[in-house]
Amino acid sequence: MTRAWSWFFSVVALATLAFLVGIFVWQSVPVWQHEGASYVTGAKWFFREKEFGALPMIYGSVVVSIVALVLAAPLGVGAAVFTAEYLPRGPRLAVKVLIELLAGVPSVVYGLLGILLLRDWIYALFAPFDLLSGDTLLTAAVLLAVMILPTIVTLSDDALRAVPAAQRRAARALGLTRAEAILHIALPQARRGLSAALLLAMGRAVGETIAVFLVVGRQDNNLPERLLSLRPLLESGQTLTSKLGSSETNIGYGDPLHWAAIVGLGLILLVLTGALTVLGASVRRTSHA
């Protein structure tokens, strides 16, 4: 009976997801018919001229998430190594609880802290580059790095603790120091779990809305001529989530084509976050197996 109920609720969850995806696809059909592939590859978004190109927002989401991951990954994995390998059980659990509490802080609180503290700090730090304001892609990336840090630490700690203690003792018996045992035994065997932690954290970063909305500047059509250029990080930009969280969502509801373009952004965001989450979860299950 338990197995039947489990199957039932699993089917309901999958059917609900399929229904949501179907709604997004159906609602966004007009913009795909109007723009075609240029909806994804187009660099201009002017809804009054019926021109919809989502590439600058995709670029903003990807760049902000990658920079956030680059900033948070070393600190998060390092903290996980400390909690999993050096702290005794009692202090480890206390530290882990405190870290997980950070994950429960509402994103709007992080956004307000970004406005009060981080925005001015970024502006002062990069003043020689003639910033127009502290609302930049870099500000959003640094803020996201703080927000995804608890995810990286918690999942990385779990991955390291899953490595059998017997292997650590065997390494120490062979003459390896604790640091060498961590470097050559624990980290290589936990690499799949660590990769899953980073993928899931990036999925969280891509889907974050309110905090990014408050500090990213929300400037449309900020697509650099060279994708590897660092200068756009110091300028205001737009992400998929900041566009969806703006007043344009309400404006677009009265125009079928504009509304389809907004829903299309939601579909792209759903695909990105879903792919990262599924990939991270599958890597994590493989590592546990």
Image: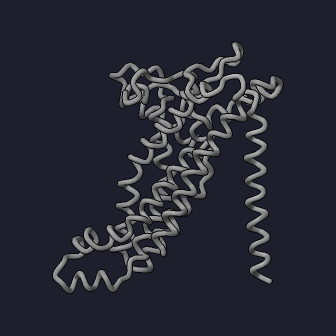
Q: What residue is at 73 percent from the left and 47 percent from the top?
A: 21
Left or right, 124 with respect to 54, comes to left
Q: What residue is at 38 percent from the left and 65 percent from the top?
A: 191
Reply above or below: 155 against 274. below
Quarter of the rendering containing residue 88 = bottom left
Q: Report the label total.
A: 0
Task: Say if residue 278 shows up in the picture.
Answer: yes
Quarter of the rendering containing residue 46 = top right
- The quadrant of the rendering that contains the N terminus is bottom right
- Expressed as whole percent of the image width and height from the top left, the position of residue 188 reads 32, 68
- Expressed as whole percent of the image width and height from the top left, the position of residue 168 reads 29, 81
Left or right, 52 with respect to 236, comes to right
Reply above or below: 270 against 99. above
Q: What residue is at 56 percent from the left and 62 percent from the top?
A: 101
What colour scheme governs how the chains and residues are painted in the rendered image of this protein?
Answer: one colour
- Expressed as whole percent of the image width and height from the top left, the position of residue 153 reads 45, 62
Task: Say if residue 117 shows up in the picture.
Answer: no
Residue in front for this viewpoint, 30 or 203: 30
Q: Residue furthest right?
A: 254
Quarter of the rendering containing residue 249 = top right
Left or right, 28 with respect to 76, comes to right
